């Protein structure tokens, strides 16, 4: 009886701690949304006020109708999704090939991929500018997507290597005995097992591409092709900064990341064992 009571107290404390942690983590998002629906000048006059006195959606209307933020949102969405899909596609095949066919080389490769993050991205700006200018990719979404792949694919390969190493070789051998070729084993056996790892890698890849600022600022010079990170920075350059519009635009920028995480969170929570059963 005492043991169950102690377990109940421990469980209650754990839920209480996690609830406080969740509120603490989500508070910045709530603060941004509440400031986005405040009336004109309300955020500047009383920045510490929590509840809006005059609820309005005019800030969102200004961001989308007058500033064209919807176009910037679609640009970032297209580029981030394209970079994520291509990076996961090639990284999954590369990671599987390294683990299964070049296991010794894979350890050296993982260290090399990790070392590439020691160098700042600004070092790639000049070579990319020269190559993209000659190829006609400056101020294009395709060019920016290619630039994002330069750091998305190495990052995805480095993350997926550890997940592919957890796949039991016996599962693949059993499928091969049943007549499945290498491609079928990879698609129908291996990928379901590492689905949680692919989902986690996709989230990080998407967030990195969505929030990227440097390459988007350098390679895109037209307003209609500008990404949301550069568009938000452009709002700070105005003579009078409208905090309501800034908060409205910021809340919209956060929304796709939250939706993308919700859609694939089941793959992460499913676990590796569930993937192998499938």
Image (spheres, helix red, strand yellow):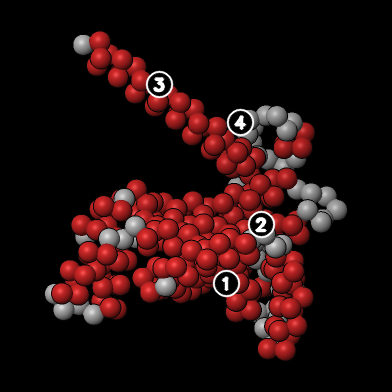
User: Can you say whether 128 is above or below 194 in the image?
Assistant: below
Q: Quadrant of residue 237?
A: bottom right
Q: Earlier in the sequence, mark 4 or mark 1?
A: 4
Cβ atoms under marks 2 and 4 closer than 8 Å: no
**Which part of the image, by quadrant, shows the C terminus?**
bottom left
- The CA span between labels 4 and 1 is 42 Å
| Label 3 element class | helix
Cβ atoms under marks 1 and 3 closer than 8 Å: no
In the image as oriented, which residue stretches furthest toward the top? Answer: 2
The disc placed on residue 51 is: 4
Q: Residue 12: x and y, percent?
A: 36, 21
For disc 3, the marked residue is 13
| Crowding at mark 2 (Cα within 10 Å: few <14, some 14-19, many 20+) | many
For disc 2, the marked residue is 63
Q: Residue 74: x and y, percent?
A: 57, 67
Q: Earlier in the sequence, mark 2 or mark 1?
A: 2
| Label 4 element class | loop
Q: Quadrant of residue 186?
A: bottom left
Residue at 67% x, 29% y is: 49
For disc 1, the marked residue is 149
Q: Earlier in the sequence, mark 3 or mark 4?
A: 3
Q: Residue 118: x and y, percent?
A: 67, 59
- The CA span between labels 3 and 2 is 43 Å
């Amino acid at each position: 009886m005492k043991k169950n009571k102690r377990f109940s107290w421990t469980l209650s404390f754990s839920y209480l701690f996690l609830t406080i942690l969740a509120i603490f983590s989500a508070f910045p998002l709530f603060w941004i949304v509440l400031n986005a629906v405040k009336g004109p000048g309300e955020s500047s006059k009383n920045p510490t006020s929590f509840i809006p006195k005059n609820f309005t959606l005019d800030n969102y209307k200004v961001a989308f109708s007058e500033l064209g933020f919807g176009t910037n949102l679609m640009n970032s969405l297209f580029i981030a999704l394209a970079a994520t899909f291509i990076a996961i596609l090639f990284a999954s095949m590369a990671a599987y090939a390294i683990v299964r066919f070049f296991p010794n080389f894979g350890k050296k490769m993982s260290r090399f991929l990790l070392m590439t993050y020691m160098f700042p991205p600004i070092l790639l700006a000049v070579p990319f500018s020269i190559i993209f200018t000659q190829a006609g990719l400056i101020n294009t979404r395709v060019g920016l997507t290619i630039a994002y792949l330069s750091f998305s694919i190495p990052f995805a390969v480095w993350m997926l290597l550890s997940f592919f190493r957890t796949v039991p070789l016996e599962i693949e051998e059993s499928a091969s005995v049943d007549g499945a070729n290498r491609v079928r084993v990879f698609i129908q056996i291996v990928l379901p097992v590492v689905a949680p790892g692919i989902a986690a890698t996709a989230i990080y890849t998407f967030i990195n591409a969505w929030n990227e600022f440097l390459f988007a600022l350098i390679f895109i010079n037209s307003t209609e092709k500008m990404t949301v990170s550069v568009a938000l920075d452009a709002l700070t350059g105005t003579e009078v900064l409208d905090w309501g519009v800034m908060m409205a635009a910021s809340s919209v920028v956060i929304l796709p990341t939250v939706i993308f995480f919700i859609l694939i969170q089941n793959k992460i929570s499913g676990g590796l064992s569930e993937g192998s059963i499938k």
